[in-house]
Amino acid sequence: MEQKKQTVLDIRAKKNSGSKISMLTAYDYPWALLVDRAGIDIILVGDSLGMVVLGYQDTVSVTMDEMIHHVKAVTGVVKSSLVVGDMPFGSYNVSVKKAIKNANRFMKEGRADCIKLEGGMIMAPVISAIVKAGIPVQGHIGLTPQTASALGGFKVQGKSAAAARALIDDAKALEDSGCFSIVLEAIPAPIAKMVTEAVSIPTIGIGAGSDCDGQVLVTYDMVGLFDRFTPKFVKQYTKISETISGVISEFKADVENGKFPEEKHSFTMKADELEQLKKDLSD
């Protein structure tokens, strides 16, 4: 039976029902197809694609055009998952007008269901304006990779009482601004639990413990396809890069040893046509 298309209202309802929310990244047609078929609630077309797909050193370099390109590849195949377009650095923190314009691009050109952006209380006015423009927004607080340098690097956030209180205040501000859910990244599990209890909208954790309303991972981390580093919070279910490397090496050896292609991989033609060609060439 075909699965029902998830909506932001469905995601919000899961918090009240106690149903955990699953969320994974996808950046192209084959990955989106696999994730959607598995029944994952939310697909994030994250700016993490800059590192795991495009080979950049960080996510800051990712452009709107690159994000739209990948979102379109995902939304073209997804039937049930809610698709979130990740607003890249510089697309929403310059002005409210530019933020709304770029959020509209995700919806019109990319066919995304909603957008995500990073930042707490300081971004509330921008989020409120985007929501008022009719575009659902997912928030993101804690470790915000786009501004990691301002946070002292890729470090756990909210470790002091004051910092933890600020996270709770940020979450409440995002809820008040109209966010339908919030990603909590790299914060202590007890603080994530407090944040989750402090707001009525779902929290989705990544390195934030088990008390969040849902969990998200980068698929390339989860399956061992990105090997530059593996964050502490990642559960690596397999190491697909080793399998792929083995297959590539086997192909190389088969080509060099004349084992590929075999007859079953080749095309033929009618014998009389082949003989006629040989005759024509010899005349």
Image: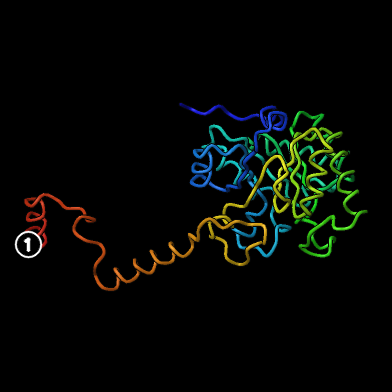
Secondary structure category for the residue under label 1: loop
Q: What x and y, as percent, mark residue 44?
A: 64, 44
Number of residues whose C-alpha sits closer than 10 Å to that of mark 1, classed few (under 14), some (14–19) or many (20 or more) = few
Q: As displayed, is residue 20 above or below residue 51?
A: above
Q: As displayed, is residue 175 above or below residue 61?
A: above
The structure residue drawn at horizontal position 57% and vertical position 37%, both measured from the top left corner, is: 75
Decide if residue 256 is on the left or right side of residue 97. left
Decide if residue 17 is on the left or right side of residue 260. right
Q: Quadrant of residue 276?
A: bottom left
Q: What x and y, as percent, mark residue 145?
A: 75, 56
Residue under pointer 1:
283
Q: Looking at the image, which is closer to me, 198 or 176? A: 198
Q: Quadrant of residue 22?
A: top right
Q: Quadrant of residue 71?
A: top right
The structure residue drawn at horizontal position 57% and vertical position 61%, both measured from the top left corner, is: 226
Image quadrant where one finds the N terminus: top left
Q: Looking at the image, which is closer to me, 104 or 280? A: 104
Image quadrant where one finds the C terminus: bottom left
Q: What x and y, as percent, mark residue 130?
A: 80, 35
The structure residue drawn at horizontal position 90% and vertical position 43%, both measured from the top left corner, is: 169
